[in-house]
Amino acid sequence: MKSVVALGNFDGVHRGHHHLLKAAVAVGIKEKLTCIAWTFEKHPKNVLAGECITKQIMTNDMKYELIRYIGVDKVVFADFEKVKDLSCEEFVDKVLVQELSAAHVFCGENYTFGKKAAGNAKKLFQLCESRGIKVTIIPILQSSGTDICSTRIRTLIEQGKVEQANLLLLQRFFIRGEVLKGNKIGSKYNMPTVNMVIPHDIVKPKSGVYFSKTVADGESYISLTNIGTRPTVGGTEENMETHIIGYHGNLYGKIIDVHLLKYHRGEKKFDSLDELFRQIEKDIEDRKKWNG
């Protein structure tokens, strides 16, 4: 069966990606074609470098869910190693024609392909046109006069500017992970937290306290999240702990999503646990009053 193919890395599935994918889905429905998003299992820069030099905004399972939610029928996570040395012509013939049976291709105006990124969107248009394949090139969306791109969003997250990053994303930035057992210090102060580790290949937000929303067992709760080393209790390793306001269940071993909504304050070392938890009490009250 012929298909409409959306090409891109799609990290973060931001507003620009959403625009491109929705356009591809619309054509697929109109022309009764299978809509396929073709992306990479690993970021090309990381494959070429042999290490994780570009942190991702989300994991592949999160990316898959969001792309499918838009209406795409199938998501292909390609092995960059297997295509990186293809010439532009070979990429079109082997991937688009033979593998995907493409009748219509969508890409962003800054799309590159082929060995050493030799091909651009214009080259793709020319090669596909000669093979009877339609190509739609989607202009890059802008916000405040600047291109919406994954690199910009990563930088905002690293700077703690999650509110600005969230405006560029299809959804609010969130971290998914398993709830691990902690030292239960918070429970002694009637402020239990769920502990998680940020995946090593996911962009790390600036250390500090965030207003957050936590989704657990299909329910959404307001919450407060701290990212950092917890210096007051002598911590040295990066940790993420979230107090879910009003929640009293047991989440150990479960997978939850923590959405970061607003940077509240920086992490600091307090003189005592009592002082720390007095501050957390104030943070919780601030979170309850915030209507963002």
Image: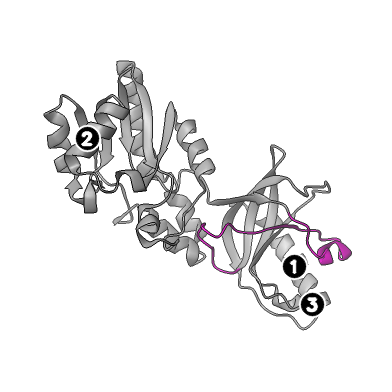
For the residue pair 115 and 102, the one nearer the viewer reads as: 115
Mark 2 falls on what kind of element?
A: helix
Residue under the image location 83 percent in, 63 percent down? 184
Mark 1 falls on what kind of element?
A: helix
Mark 3 falls on what kind of element?
A: helix
* Residue marked by disc 2: 92
Residue under the image location 73 percent in, 61 percent down? 284
CB-based contact (under 8 Å), mark 3 and mark 2: no
Q: Position of residue 217 (x, y in %)?
A: 72, 39
For the residue pair 76 and 145, the one nearer the viewer reads as: 76
Distance from disc 1 to disc 2, alpha carbons, whole Å, reads 56 Å
Q: Amino acid at mark 2?
A: Val
Q: Is residue 164 above or below residue 128?
A: below
Residue 143 lies left or right of residue 270; in this view the side is left
Q: Identify the mark nearer the N-term, 3 or 2.
A: 2
Q: Is residue 159 magenta?
A: no
- Alpha-carbon neighbours of circle 3 within 10 Å: few (<14), some, or many (≥20)? few
Colouring method of the image: one colour
Q: Amino acid at mark 1?
A: Ile
Q: Quadrant of the N terminus?
A: top left
Q: Is residue 146 above or below residue 98?
A: below
* Viewer can see residue 105: no
* Residue marked by disc 1: 280
Residue 159 lies left or right of residue 282; in this view the side is left
Q: Identify the mark nearer the N-term, 1 or 2.
A: 2
Q: Amino acid at mark 3?
A: Glu
* Residue marked by disc 3: 275
Q: Position of residue 286 (x, y in %)?
A: 69, 62
